[in-house]
Amino acid sequence: MRKTIALTLATAALIAGGTALAQDAQRPQRVERPAEMTRDAVEQRANAAFERLDVNKDGTIDAADREARVEQVARTRFDAADADGDGAISYDEFAALREVRKDRRTDRRATRVERQAARGEGLRGPAARGDRRGPGRGIARAMIGQDGSVSKADFIGDALSRFDAADADSDGVVTVEERRGAARENIRARRGLSG
C-alpha cells in the first residue's frame, strides 16, 4: 500500500515538476533580434517557425500537429528524467531533474537581469507583471480557419502584415524605434485609445 501511494505521489510530482523541463528541452534557444529587421528576414523566420509547428508536414497547423507536439514533449520529458534509460524513473532521477531545472531557472533569471541592467532598465512589461507568456505570443485568432487550422500562407502573411504595419517609412526595414512605436500603437489600440 505504501509503495502504491509513494509511486502515485512520485508520478504526480514528476508530471507537475517535469513540465517546465520539457518546455526548456523543446524550446529553441532564444536568438537575439537584430537592431534592424528586413522583410525578407521576417519571412524567413516565419517560414522556419511554421515548419517547426507543422509537425506532420501537411501544410497546415491544426489539432493533429498540436497533439503530435504534446506527444513529442512528453517523450522528451520522460527521456530527460529517465537518466539510466531503463524505462522507469527513480526518486534519485526525479530529484536530479528538479535540481537541473532549478539551476536553469536561476541562470535564465540572472541573464535577463544582466541584460536589462546593461540597457539601463528595470523589469518592465510581462516580466514585471509576472506574465510568462508575454505579448504577441501564439497564433492570431484571425488566421485560424473554421476547422481550427492555420495555413502556411496565412501564417507567413500575418507576420508580413505585422512587419508592414511596423515599417513606418515603408523602406523595407524595421528599426528599433519603429518596433517600439508599433508596440505602443498596438497597446493603445487594445486599450481603445486613439492616436
Image (spheres, helix red, strand yellow):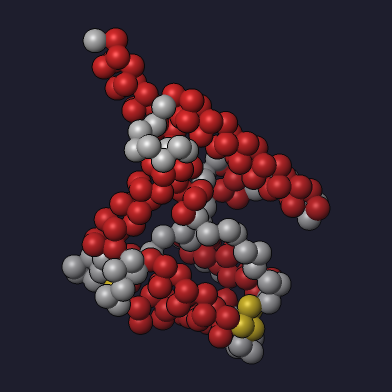
Q: Nearer the viewer, residue 108 or 124?
A: 108
Left or right, 156 with respect to 61, comes to right
Q: What residue is rendered at 71% in x and 47% in y?
A: 111
Q: Position of residue 20 (x, y in %)?
A: 47, 41
Instruction: Count numbered badges in the picture.
Output: 0
Q: Residue most toward the bottom?
A: 171
Q: Nearer the viewer, residue 125 or 102?
A: 102
Left or right, 65 with respect to 17, comes to left
Q: Is residue 58 above or below residue 139?
A: below
Left or right, 105 with respect to 83, comes to right
Q: Residue most toward the left?
A: 147
Query: Where is residue 168, by image quadrant?
Result: bottom right
Regarding residue 137, the answer to whether it shows in the image is: yes
Q: The C terminus lies in which quarter of the figure?
A: bottom right
Q: Position of residue 22 (x, y in %)?
A: 45, 46
Q: What residue is rendered at 35% in x and 78% in y?
A: 152
